[in-house]
Amino acid sequence: MNRAESQDAPAAAEHAPSRWQRLKKPLTALFFLLLIVLFTLLARRIDWSEVFDTLQDFKVRTLIIASTITVLSFLTYACFDLIGRTYIGQNLTWRQILPVGVISYAFNLNLSAWVGGIAMRYRLYSRLGVSKGNIAKILGLSLATNWFGYMLVAGAIFSSGLVHMPPGWKLSSTALQGVGLLLLLVSAGYLAACRFSSRREWSIRGVEINLPSLRMAVLQLALGALNWSLMAAVIFTLLPSTLDYPLVLGVLLISAIAGVITHIPAGLGVLEAVFVALLQHQASRGSLVAGLLAYRAIYFLLPLLITVAMYLVVEAKAKALRIEKKPS
C-alpha cells in the first residue's frame, strides 16, 4: 500500500457506517412494529361501548375543572422561561416571555421537542432579539427545570411505595423504590452543586453553561415538580373516583419515561398502554381509556388549536412590523 492509500484508509474508515448505524433502522422499525401489535391487542381488549358511554357521561363541571388545571399547568411551564430570562440577564417583559412558553409547550406536547421545544423557541425568541447563544441557554435551563422537577416528584412518589408494579414485570416494586431514592439523590446533588461548586461555567459545543444559584435551582425544582403534579391532577379529575391521586401521579411519571424511550409524538398510545397495564385491577379498562382520551383532548389538542392561532397572530404582527420598517 502506498502513502496515499494509507492516508485515505483512516478517512474511509471514519465515514464507514458502524454496526450500530447499520442496525439502527431495522431495529427501530421492529420496535415500532411490536408497539403496533401491542396497541392492537390492547384495543381488542377494550370495551369501546363503555368508553363512549363514559365520555358522554362527563359532567360539565368536571371538564371545566380539568380545563382550569390545564391553564395553570401551561402557565407554570411558561414560567420556566421566566427563570431563563433571569438566567441570561435579558431585558424582556413577562408579556413577551409567557406567550413563547405557552406556544412552545403546546407544540412540544403534540409535535415533539424538536418542533416545539427547539424550533419554535428559536423562531419566537429570534423575533424578540435574543441571540442564538442565549436561546440555547434558555432551552437548556427549561430542560433542566422539567427533568429535575420530574426527579424530585418521581423520587418522592416511587420511594414512598405508593406505586406497585404488576406481578411479572421486570421492574419490581422494590426496585422502583430504589429508583426513587436514586432520583432524590440526583436532585439533592444538583442543589448541592449549585450551592457549593467552585466551578460555575462550562462550554459545550461553543455554548457557555453557567451553574445557577441555589435559589434559582430550588425554584427550578419547585416549578418542574408543580407542572408534573398539575398534569397528573388533570388526569385524576377525568379518571374514576376510586383511584387515588398519588397513584395516578406515579403512573403518569412511569408513562413519561416510556414515552421518551419510544420517541412517539405526544406519547400516542404509550400513555394509555401504561395506565391500563398498571391500573386495570382498580378500574375498568373502558373508563381508563375514556378518561385518557378526554385528557388528550383537553391537555393536548385544545391548547394546540389555541396556540396555533396565537402563533399566527405573532407572525402577523412581526410581518406588519417589517413592512413598517422597510424603507420606501
Image (cartoon, rainbow, N blue to C red):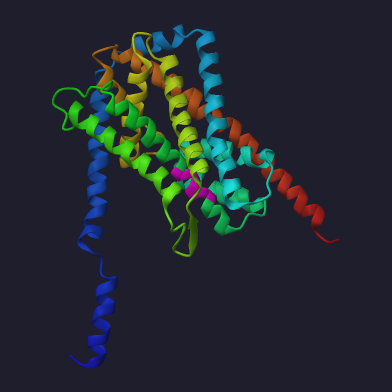
- The relative height of residue 79 versus residue 271 in the rendered view (above or below) is below
Seen at 45% across and 44% down, the residue is: 143
- The relative height of residue 314 versus residue 275 in the rendered view (above or below) is below
Specify the quadrant that holds the N terminus. bottom left
Q: Secondary structure of the magenta portion, mostly? A: helix
Q: How many labels were placed on the picture?
A: 0
Seen at 49% across and 39% down, the residue is: 220
- The relative height of residue 15 versus residue 248 in the rendered view (above or below) is below
Specify the quadrant that holds the C terminus. bottom right
- Where in the figure is residue 188, as x and y percent of width and height? 37, 40
Near-viewer residue (217 or 61):
217
- The relative height of residue 51 versus residue 142 in the rendered view (above or below) is above
Residue 270 visible in the current orientation: no
Residue 40 visible in the current orientation: yes
Residue 184 horizontal side relative to residue 58, left or right: left
Near-viewer residue (39 or 256):
256
Q: Looking at this rendering, what residue extends furthest in the bottom direction?
A: 2
- Where in the figure is residue 284, as x and y percent of width and height? 29, 11
Is residue 137 on the magenta stretch? no
Residue 110 horizontal side relative to residue 5, left or right: right
* Image: magenta residue range: 138-144
- Where in the figure is residue 147, as x and y percent of width and height? 41, 40
The answer to which quarter of the image holds residue 171 is top left
Residue 159 horizontal side relative to residue 296, left or right: left
Is residue 143 on the magenta stretch? yes
Seen at 27% across and 34% down, the residue is: 181
The answer to which quarter of the image holds residue 165 is top left
Near-viewer residue (178 or 60):
178
Q: Looking at this rendering, what residue extends furthest in the right direction?
A: 328
